[in-house]
Image (cartoon, rainbow, N blue to C red):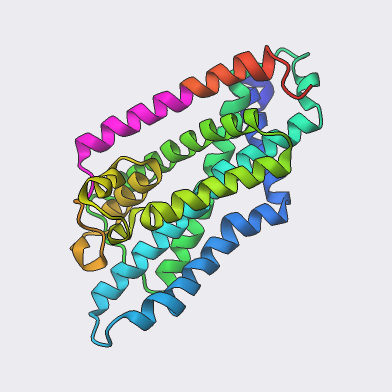
């Protein structure tokens, strides 16, 4: 089936998604920071910081779970970079090159534009996450899903979609408030780094965060919620041995409520920006 045979909104979303992926894959700097750097960071952390500090008699199962934890947290870092920094950078480039001056002259569905870019970001984010996780598995990370592979995969993808959706909304706000691609990249990279370190490496090192009340936020903050839910789905383990608890891992009811709320909020922000700024406003002028 070709784009010409599809409804206009779907065909336009498909076109924007393909273009976003194509342009991103041609950007060597973006590829390095989103895929290669998180993988290198995982290996450097494991072999220079984590392994030298572990007791010589650490059980193999415990070591495998620690490697899984590190692989997932750096995989989420890669997804954050793709979906926040990459999305904002490409949108800013289009604005600077006055592409929206031309796009507004065509019968484009505003939501199709951002939805297509979003789908492209999700696919790239899943790729970044998967590449780090694959290296972790080759390095000895342990994966033993609590549920069937179908259910586990659905959980992982749902959490990544939610995270990428919020990144899209944040990226739109940053692009709207900044001036130029260099400034946009600086702000979004800063957000990613702050989110990673301030939350205890995406919620995998709660002991770095003082106070039980603040630690409890790790099951609410988007990047830490995503990391902890994915870990809990991928591995059946005593998480206290890996340092992830307390607080307890997120409950199903809390996760469903937060995911639904975050997705709804992201969609609302994206629709407003697409309609009122990108296509009905003066974006890029």
Q: Nearer the viewer, residue 209 or 243?
A: 209
Q: Residue at x 43, y 43 (%)?
A: 160
Q: Residue at x 34, y 80 (%)?
A: 53
Q: Residue at x 42, y 25 (%)?
A: 265
Q: Nearer the viewer, residue 139 or 15?
A: 139
Residue 208 coordinates in the image, percent (x, y): 32, 60
Q: Quadrant of residue 284?
A: top right
Q: Nearer the viewer, residue 241 or 256?
A: 241
The answer, for residue 251, to whether it is visible in the render is yes
Tally of marks: 0
Work out which residue is located at the far bottom of the displayed protein and give it. 56
Does the magenta run of residues contain 60?
A: no
Residue 245 coordinates in the image, percent (x, y): 21, 58
Residue 205 coordinates in the image, percent (x, y): 32, 60
Q: Is residue 233 above or below residue 163?
A: below
- In which quadrant will I find the N terminus? top right
Q: Which residues, given as a range, are shown in magenta?
A: 249-267
Q: Is residue 223 above or below residue 207?
A: above
Q: Quadrant of residue 66?
A: bottom left
- In which quadrant will I find the C terminus? top right
Q: Main secondary structure of the magenta part?
A: helix
Q: Is residue 52 left or right of residue 171?
A: left
Does the magenta run of residues contain 255?
A: yes
The answer, for residue 109, to whether it is visible in the render is no
Q: Is residue 263 left or right of residue 62?
A: right
Q: Is residue 182 left or right of residue 119?
A: right
Q: Is residue 41 above or below residue 30?
A: below
Q: Residue at x 31, y 72 (%)?
A: 64
């Amino acid at each position: 089936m070709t784009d010409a045979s599809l409804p206009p909104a779907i065909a336009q979303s498909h076109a924007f998604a393909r273009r976003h992926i194509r342009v991103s894959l041609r950007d060597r700097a973006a590829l390095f920071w989103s895929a290669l750097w998180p993988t290198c960071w995982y290996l450097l952390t494991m072999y220079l910081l984590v392994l030298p500090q572990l007791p010589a008699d650490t059980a193999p199962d415990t070591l495998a779970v620690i490697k899984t934890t590190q692989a997932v947290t750096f995989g989420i870092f890669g997804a954050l970079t793709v979906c926040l920094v990459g999305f904002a950078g490409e949108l800013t480039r289009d604005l600077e090159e006055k592409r929206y001056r031309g796009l507004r002259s065509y019968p484009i569905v505003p939501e199709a534009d951002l939805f297509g870019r979003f789908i492209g970001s999700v696919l790239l984010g899943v790729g970044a996450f998967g590449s780090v996780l694959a290296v972790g598995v080759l390095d000895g990370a342990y994966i033993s899903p609590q549920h069937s592979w179908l259910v586990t995969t659905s959980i992982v993808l749902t959490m990544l979609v939610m995270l990428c959706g919020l990144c899209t909304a944040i990226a739109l706000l940053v692009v709207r408030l900044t001036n130029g691609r260099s400034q946009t990249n600086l702000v979004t990279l800063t957000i990613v780094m702050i989110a990673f370190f301030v939350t205890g490496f995406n919620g995998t090192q709660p002991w770095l965060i003082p106070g039980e009340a603040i630690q409890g936020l790790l099951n609410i903050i988007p990047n830490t919620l995503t990391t902890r839910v994915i870990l809990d789905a991928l591995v059946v383990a005593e998480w206290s041995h890996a340092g992830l608890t307390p607080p307890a891992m997120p409950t199903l009811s809390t996760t469903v409520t937060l995911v639904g709320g975050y997705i709804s909020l992201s969609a609302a922000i994206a629709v407003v920006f697409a309609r009122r700024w990108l296509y009905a406003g003066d974006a890029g002028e």
